[in-house]
Amino acid sequence: MNGRVIALHVRTEKHGTPTPVAEAVGRIGGGIEGDVHAHRESRAVLVVDRATLDALGLRPADLREEITTLGLPDVTNLPIDTEIRVGGLTLRVNGPCEPCTHIGELLGVPDPEEFRLSLLGRRGALCTVAVSGPVRVGDPVEVLVPA
């Protein structure tokens, strides 16, 4: 499974607005430098594919993802410990991001519970940085097959 990065976002505050960036660097064992989740060990980086956003009429970062890809429509369902090379980063999948009603509330949807249900199985993959390096918009994304 291969794709490319189409957007990168960081948030400097927990409930802050995602800010687009052209380049970012990961923190080994954590998330993206400068992001509010950089220090986390398991819910550090959220990767969402554009297919999910398109299906729901959303834009990059609407689901509060740090990395938006194109070409990985099933990223949510990658097995735990799968590695994904994203530009110069390698991410380790910790599991799917379980949808909550909070995201619908943030987006101001009429029915947050209905919106939560629409995200089941496609809310994205929660990851941790395994290998640090730069990632840029346009970089290739590759799901690595274990040796």
Image (cartoon, grey):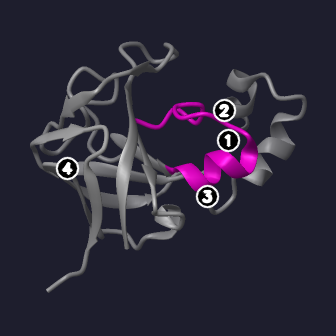
Disc 2 marks which amino acid?
Ile
Name the element at disc 1.
loop
Task: Write down the residue under mark 2.
Answer: 103
Disc 1 marks which amino acid?
Cys
Q: Earlier in the sequence, mark 1 or mark 4?
A: 4
Q: Position of residue 79 (x, y in %)?
A: 40, 73
Name the element at disc 3.
loop
Q: Is residue 7 on the magenta stretch?
A: no
Disc 3 marks which amino acid?
Arg
Going 26% across and 49% down the picture, which residue do you hit? Answer: 128
Q: Which mark is residue 117?
A: none
Going 33% across and 40% down the picture, which residue do you hit? Answer: 44
- Whether residue 55 is visible, yes or no, is yes
Relative to 108, say whether 8 is above or below.
below
Name the element at disc 4.
loop
Q: Which mark is residue 87?
A: 4
Q: Is residue 55 on the magenta stretch?
A: yes
Relative to 73, say whether 114 is above or below.
above
- Image quadrant in which the C terminus is located: bottom left
Q: Which mark is residue 100?
A: 1
- Image quadrant in which the N terminus is located: bottom left
Return the residue nearer the eye: 8 or 131: 8
**CB-based contact (under 8 Å), mark 2 and mark 1:** yes
Structural crowding at the residue carrying mark 2, measured as other residues with C-alpha within 10 Å and reported as few (<14), some (14–19) or many (≥20): some
Q: Which residue extends farthest bottom?
A: 147
Q: Position of residue 86 (x, y in %)?
A: 24, 52
Give the alpha-carbon distance from disc 3 to disc 2, as whole Å: 14 Å
Task: Write down the residue under mark 3.
Answer: 122
Going 40% across and 22% down the picture, which residue do you hit? Answer: 20
Q: Nearer the viewer, mark 2 or mark 1?
A: 2
